[in-house]
Image (cartoon, rainbow, N blue to C red):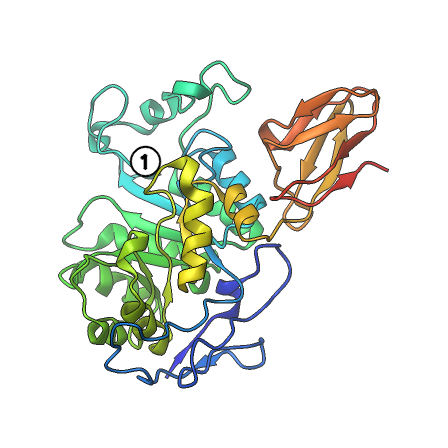
Amino acid sequence: MRTLNVALLAVLIAGTAVGPAAHAAGATHATDAADPVCVPNPTHSPWPPGVDPGPPLAVPFLSAHRGGTNLAPQQTAEAYRSAIAFGATVIEVDLRRLRDGTMVIFHDDAGPDGRALHQVTLAEFKAWNAATGSWAGTAFDPARYQTFAEVLAIAGQAGVGLDIEFKSFHLLGGPYREVATAVAAAGLMEKTIWQYYSDLEVPLISAIQGVDPDARFNYNLLGIETPQGLYNRARGRDFSFGSELAAFTAPRLSAIHDGCGIAVPHSYDEGADQEYAQIQAGRARGVDGFQTNQVDVAADALDRPVSSAWTRQGGTACLVNPANGYGLPGRQVHRLDGATLITGPGGCVTAGGQRMIFPGDGAAQASAEA
């Protein structure tokens, strides 16, 4: 028997706990915190073409890919805080190791100077400016890449889990254990998922399970999996399943759901301007959530706007999610004198002595200063 962690499936509007609806008659999913048990049952086997995939989770599962990358430079503190503010269930991080052993968040194998990450010191890493391209010269410039410890603290403050992918292979498993131990110490293991692509990744799987035998894994589909194989994975260690949206056919979705797993495809594969449409199409297909580059767009597409509130320090007013205190950047707001402004880092604007009003949009609810 496999249990579902209701906190892991938290509603986009932080602070409201809602359990998932049952996927199918045979797989009884949690409906509230008092009944967090899902019993795998191959009700729809052999999962033929045209099989009913069952309804998606009532509360979509959102993984913020490298943070809110349309809201701030990717892989920075502001990107991760913004993603959490707009309702990410987990924040996705790509882990690499520096020369001194420090674990850092960085997707590519080489930095802006062309050197591999394992050749770089922490001081050199922290000197790199993430505010490149369209972010250069903006209020977000300069922006610094983050260590794993720094991002873990950001997640821990809000009680949000991580979606962890190691970008390097570690045969002896030391870095895997190190990171898993830190996640467990932060109290986030039950809310965190661990990415992998093959059963051959034994050092990773063994190290994580050595810290927590009930650790949640995310298996990334290669496109060759059978429904029976996916059912077996879902009823075992694999909590979630990722890949491009097209990989999640009705038979595969039905098998995943019967096994008590959830489908979390990418919504960004067709480009930024197609994420809204991809998310709506995926929900109609029966997927349970998305790995997204634009968490605010996802909140809008899913019709799950987060709460907002104003905080003030002197002449600076900040629009934040009151559930976690993190800012809501990129929102059009108004001063009482009629000026229209766009919230910047931390959701902040220069308000002077003027009262601020946010009329609301698809991603966040309206609020006004008292």
- Name the amino acid, label 1: Phe
Kindly tell me whether residue 141 is visible in this rendering: yes
| Drawn side of residue 9 relative to residue 93, left or right | right
The residue lying toward the viewer, choosing from 338 and 215, is 338
Q: Residue furthest right?
A: 370
The N terminus, quarter of image? bottom left
Image quadrant assignment for residue 27: bottom left
Relative to 321, say whether 140 is above or below.
above
| Drawn side of residue 326 relative to residue 335, left or right | left
Q: Which residue is mark 1?
A: 106
The residue located at (44%, 51%) in the rendering is: 279
Relative to 40, say whether 158 is above or below.
above
Relative to 292, say whether 334 is above or below.
above
**Horizontal and vertical percent position of residue 16:** 64, 62
| Drawn side of residue 302 relative to residue 310, left or right | left
**Horizontal and vertical percent position of residue 90:** 46, 53
**Horizontal and vertical percent position of residue 21:** 51, 74
Q: Residue furthest front?
A: 50
